[in-house]
Image (cartoon, grey):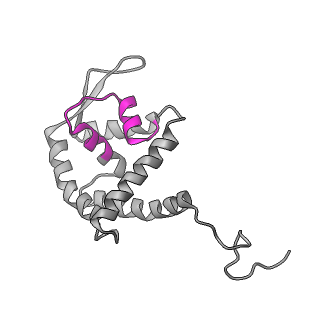
C-alpha cells in the first residue's frame, strides 16, 4: 500500500468543491452552537423547533410537527411528552393511534420561547457567522433551494 502524500487525500487532483459535504461539516459547528444557545434557557434544538412551530397559533399534530421540524415522528413523541410535562405545550384531547390530537403552545411555552429568541437571533447575526447582510440573505435563499430540491422526492 502506497503512502498518501500531504494534500493528496482521496482525490489525486486535490479535493473538489463538495457543497453538501461542506454543509454537513458546518452543521456540526452550528448544532454545537445552538445546543449552547438553547441549553442556556433549558431547551434542546428539537424542543425549540416545536415551540417555534406552534408559536404562530396553529395547533399541529405530532406527525405535522415532525414533518415541519424534520425529525422522525417517534422522536417527536418523547419531545412532546416532555414539553407537556413541563407545561410548555398542551394536547387537545387524548390522541392515540389513528386519532388526531393537536398540540398547542402554552403561555409558559411562549414565555420560554421569547427568552430563547435573542440568543437565536444573535447566533444567526451576519457578523457572527462572518457574512454581510446580503450574503446571509443569499445563503438562506440557497439553503432553502437545496432543502426543497432534496426533500421533493421523499414525501417530506
**Quadrant location, the N terminus:** bottom right
* Rendering coords of residue 15 (x, y %): 64, 70
Range of the magenta residues? Answer: 49-72
* Rendering coords of residue 92 (x, y %): 24, 24
Specify whether residue 65 is painted magenta.
Answer: yes
Q: Pick whichever, 26 or 109, lies toward us.
A: 26
Left or right, 116 with respect to 22, comes to: left
Among the 4 quarters of the image, the one containing residue 140: bottom left
Residue at the spot x=54%, y=57% of the render? 20
Residue at the spot x=34%, y=52% of the render? 44
Among the 4 quarters of the image, the one containing residue 63: top left
The answer to whether residue 36 of the structure is visible from this angle is no
Residue at the spot x=42%, y=53% of the render? 142
Among the 4 quarters of the image, the one containing residue 125: bottom left
Left or right, 110 with respect to 52, comes to: left
Left or right, 15 with respect to 64, comes to: right
Instruction: Count the labels in the image.
Output: 0
* Rendering coords of residue 84 (x, y %): 27, 36
Residue furthest toward the top?
98
Judge whether 98 appears above or below 84 on screen. Answer: above
Specify whether residue 147 is painted magenta.
Answer: no
Judge whether 127 appears above or below 108 on screen. Answer: below
The answer to whether residue 65 of the structure is visible from this angle is yes
Judge whether 4 appears above or below 67 on screen. Answer: below
Q: Pick whichever, 129 or 123, lies toward us.
A: 129
Left or right, 7 with respect to 80, comes to: right
Q: Pick whichever, 72 or 146, lies toward us.
A: 146
Residue furthest toward the right?
1
Amino acid at each position: 500500500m502506497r503512502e498518501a502524500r500531504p494534500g493528496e487525500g482521496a482525490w489525486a487532483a486535490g479535493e473538489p468543491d463538495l457543497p453538501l459535504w461542506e454543509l454537513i461539516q458546518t452543521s456540526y459547528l452550528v448544532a454545537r452552537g445552538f445546543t449552547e444557545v438553547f441549553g442556556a434557557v433549558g431547551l434542546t434544538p428539537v424542543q425549540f423547533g416545536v415551540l417555534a412551530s406552534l408559536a404562530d397559533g396553529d395547533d399541529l399534530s405530532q406527525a405535522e410537527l415532525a414533518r415541519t421540524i424534520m425529525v422522525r415522528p417517534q422522536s417527536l413523541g418523547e419531545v412532546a411528552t416532555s414539553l407537556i410535562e413541563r407545561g410548555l405545550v398542551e394536547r387537545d384531547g387524548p390522541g392515540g393511534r389513528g386519532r388526531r390530537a393537536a398540540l398547542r403552545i402554552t403561555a409558559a411555552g411562549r414565555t420560554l420561547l421569547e427568552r430563547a429568541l435573542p440568543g437565536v437571533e444573535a447566533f444567526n447575526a451576519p457578523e457572527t457567522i462572518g457574512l454581510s447582510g446580503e450574503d446571509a440573505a443569499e445563503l438562506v435563499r440557497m439553503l432553502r433551494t437545496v432543502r426543497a430540491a432534496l426533500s421533493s422526492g421523499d414525501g417530506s
